Amino acid sequence: MKFTLSWLKEYLKTDKDINTILETLTNIGLEVEEAFDQNSVYKDFKVAKIISTKKHPNADRLQLCLVDIGEEKIEVVCGAKNAREGLTTIYAPVGSTIPDSGFKLKKAKIRGIESSGMLCSKKELRLGEDSEGIAEISNNLKPGKSIADELNLNDTQIEIAITPNRPDCLGVYGIARDLAAAGVGELVNRDKKEISVSKEKFPIFLDYKNKDDACSIFSGRIIRNVKNTKSPEWLVNKLEAIGLRSVNCLVDITNYINFDKGRPLHVYDLKKISKKIGARSSKKGEEIQALDGKNYKLDNEMCVIADDEKVLGIGGIMGGEDSGSSMSTTEIFLESAYFDPVKTAITGRKLNMMSDSRYRFERGVDPEYVLEGLDYATSLIIELCGGSAGEISFIDNRKFVNEKINFKPELVREMTGLKIENKITNKILNSLGFKVSKDWEITIPSWRPDISINEDIVEEVVRIYGLNNIKSEPLLNKQQPSKPILTDEQKNLRLIRRAIASRGLLETISYSFINEEDAKNYGGGKNSLKIINPISEELSDMRPTPLASIINIADENSKRGYGDLGIFELGPGFSGKSEDDQILIASGIRTGTYKLERFGKDWQGSKKVDVFDAKRDVASVLEEIGINNQKIKIKNSAPKFYHPGRSGQILSKKGEIIANFGEIHPKIIKEKDLNVAVGFEIFLDCINLLLDKKLIQTAPEIYNLQPVRRDFSFVVNNEVSAQTIIEAAMKSDNKLIQNVKIFDQFLNDKNKSIAIEITIQQTDHTLTDSELEDISLKVINSVESATKGKLRS
Amino acid sequence: MTYSETLEKEILKKISVAENQDSLEKIRIAELGKKGKISLLMKDLSKLSPEDRKEQGSKLNILKKNISEAISLKKIELANIELEKQLLEEKIDVTLPVQVNQSKYGKIHPVSQVLDEISEIFGSLGYKISEGPDIETEHYNFNALNIPESHPARQMHDTFYLNNDNTKEKYVLRTHTSPVQVRTMEKGKPPFKFISPGRTYRCDSDQTHTPMFHQIEGLVVDEKTHLGHLKWTLETFFKSFFELDNIEIQLRPSYFPFTEPSLEVDVLCDRSGPVLKIGEGSDWLEVAGAGMVHPKVLRSSNIDPSKYQGFAFGLGVDRLAQLKYGIPDLRTFFNGDIRWLSHYGFSFLDLPTLSRGLKK
């Protein structure tokens, strides 16, 4: 909402300075976004007269102007076509700041010629929209004088942010009322002008009958013999100061009242209306060319203004092009109505139409100001355009009654801690237009649709009293020292994040959405997980796994010249819309040669990453949070976006999937700038089920006797997994065999030879040769029967 | 000088100039070997008279002993020289570079770090952490928070909608973390004191907006918590977070459908220099939205507003990270440029705790 200080002062009698006013606006909830103080901005700019011009020696389009700036005559380089001898214009000296660009002028050479300062266009000075050529101002002005004084530029343009609950401040009057309540001045009510009215009354209709319907109050009157003209200067200036363009006097008057009182109105050319005018629901197939020049197709539930033949406008949003006023208009119908906030918003959204009227109606205009607003506009029209007004036609199906609240004044203290005397509470409410009875029954003013409960009243009182008067009151933690607050899940998440980073991977955070093709590649792309209004096609689908995102990130980094990298993300993957379909996944990848030992070109040599690098990442992280080999098994069943032969899945003994790891499927990275990528996904929700939460552990078993190690070599079929051999060896003597290690592997066509080392822990006595022989036999038998292989002789 | 003395001198001289183990061994064989000079002299003793034999014998024994010792010493000396020589031959170029431990390259994203910092502060104040889903129903994201369909505030939210699949409920990507208020309160009983961090989404993209960002919501509901407590809580939080004692905040009335009264919170800052400084100067910087929980929100969470009241606040996590660590462009947070991640990321060992301080 824009307005000027001088406009505000028409309604607010105050001797407070501009800074107090601006500060108060923000402090009462009308946040100042910009204040443009013309006097301070324009005082350095001077009236200047061009004495003579000549061509710039080094540039065709530039001129050298000799300019009279009062105390001296200087040479300025200028590119404007209208720069000519005798022109009075505006000069910006070196050191001044150009308002439009914020650029501070320095002494500069332009094509080899020094120019001290510049001649400005109106646009550059924010004095208008005209950017063609330099400003042309009256020849009567004296060179050297400040334009702030000479052009009367001493107003302040103010823009405030109005929250959606405050339609009453979408008019300057409402803002003045709030400031007066806050003690900045006194609210001034302008005298109403008497209008002499003829008996003529134009027939109106209102198809809607209920108070919640799209239109519940409709009124208007005709005014004959008006002379539509250009608006007087004061009106043009006022509108331009808040960024509105002057159209013609009739339209300008309605726009002016829209911003002055927050009351939208519309002027129809009476000659375009047949028989009667009113509000009704649109019929499917109806169309209208609106004032913005666009054609709108209507459905069967929009509120339109119509005569008995055709649609004239869209209720509360925009009038039609045909029925609007023009310079040749002489007879008008002036409409003032009340349109429902919800229904106006719905229609506006459906038609994608925005206007200052819709903005006000959908927030709620004052239903008690319909007729007064109509009279206000009538008197201004008669004053500026002449004419004679008819009698008001008026249908009111709303029958507005002010709401009342039984207020508990002690609530102010209970909710804010502020001890405000009841007397002051009462005074604040009165100054805002509330009526307060002796027993605190409060009548809500018609312009405050946002107030309905006690808490709303508390807000009114404290925002005017001053939120900054609220005193800090400690809200300490009663538990000292404080108890831990993280759940086991939250603790694991934090540990896992840092455990992965400790493996040399960089944490990324990426968008939870990816493109459709990627989503499909990673097992997603479901219709139900598509975003209807994505920011771009690249971000259209909820991702099934963060792995999909980080592979793209690796690709982008690789294109920037960083092809050997390790990154990870701890974020959501989605398989459906419900809460349970969102799972937390820790996903990482390594690309190129980003192995733990070393990467990139190196004199010691470097190798491409392989599936075991990813497996090592997962195993290390799992180990870190307390999941070791004994709790898991590995299967060859990773999802299809992994290389089918070089990937695996880690499962709990019960079969819950804990993690996937492997080389990313070559088809997926084919299009990308990555020659190899290995990755993993750890599913955090599953991990939490597996954890041992014992705090105190049993003492470790430490033996004095040395462990004994024995090596074996088996020839088995290539299909036999290492896991099978280790498990078989391990369980051949659970008590004494402490560890099984594979230390060599030799591959043939069909068979492979696997060498294992068994660690036997002697407990209570040194094992005899025959006891050791027994264990060896058990290992051989167990492995041979589990693998159908043979001990290598 | 006796013969044996002359001989000893002669042999010792030979030993002292021996150049290597081989020549020393030759000397040993020539003197002490079976057919060596000393051995032959020993043999010749039998030809002497018993008196002479005794005298000569003892002299020869001394000679033999001295020579043996001298050879052993020389042997050790020569071995040391040879080892020294061999080691020098094994010399390699130790200026060849090595790669440092790769774990140095692993870093924690600033948003994660800041979330850990925030949890640390609110944890010490007794807040739990409550989380909710990113895909929300319109009910939780809007309706239960007193933002009905027609509300103008819905337009401010630039909501992402998900495809409808035959269900009545419309799904959105949550536009704020406030739905977690309702979800958490529904499941429990007052009093409540928790924060809810998480990803939030809005259909907006420019230098200061990304379609995804992070918020943290805070909520306290009991029988008497009021705005004075809110002010203290936020002051305390900002002081602790920025590790500055001179934090000054101001409260400004504002509007959120889910709080009443509603307010915005600014901190005092200085924008005059190239870097924005918190806690000094004369400008104000908006850092939070807050207010007293709206009775309708309490009612949608099955809590009796005539008995319970409390405050809620929302903070932008990414923005807090930007302010604290001077990160200029929000968009760079989420594009995964490893140069950025390495620069702004935190060591995994850099675990923020209150006793250590929240800064590195």
Image (cartoon, coloured by chain):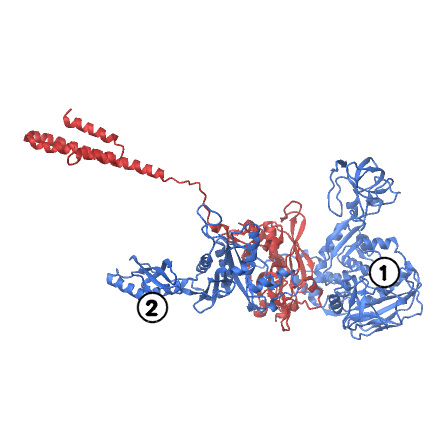
Chain colours: A blue, B red
Horizontal arrangement in the rendering, residue B35 relative to residue A717 (left or right): left
**x and y, in percent, of residue B273 in the image:** 65, 44
Q: Which chain is home to disc 1?
A: A
Residue A767 can be seen, yes or no: yes
In the current view of this chain or complex, which residue is farthest to the front?
A749
Q: Chain of mark 2?
A: A
Kindly indicate the quadrant of the structure image that contains residue A743: bottom left
Are the residues flagged by discs 2 and 1 in contact, CB closer than 8 Å?
no
**Residue A245: quadrant of the picture:** bottom right
- Residues at marks 2 and 1, CA–CA distance in whole angstroms: 98 Å
Where residue B6 sits: x, y (%)?
17, 26
Residue B9 point in image, percent of width and height: 20, 27
Work out whether A687 lies above or below B327: below
Depth order, front residue of A1/B160 = B160
Q: Nearer the viewer, residue A478 or A235?
A: A235
Q: Residue furthest top?
A: B1
Amino acid type for the residue under numbered disc 1 = Val
- Provide the residue designation for mark 2: A785
Quadrant location, the N terminus of chain A? bottom right
Mark 1 = which residue?
A251
Q: Position of residue A480 (x, y in %)?
A: 51, 59
Please identify the quadrant where the C terminus of chain A is shown.
bottom left
Q: Amino acid at mark 2?
A: Ser
Residue A483 in view (yes/no): no
Q: Is residue B311 above or below residue B27?
A: below
Secondary structure at badge 2 equals helix
Among numbered discs 2 and 1, the one appearing first in the sequence? 1
Packing grade of label 2 (10 A; few <14, some 14-19, many >=20) is: few
Out of A379 and A320, give the one closest to the viewer: A320
Residue extending furthest toward the left = B49
Total number of numbered discs in the rendering: 2
- Please tell me whether mark 1 sits on a helix, a strand or a loop: helix
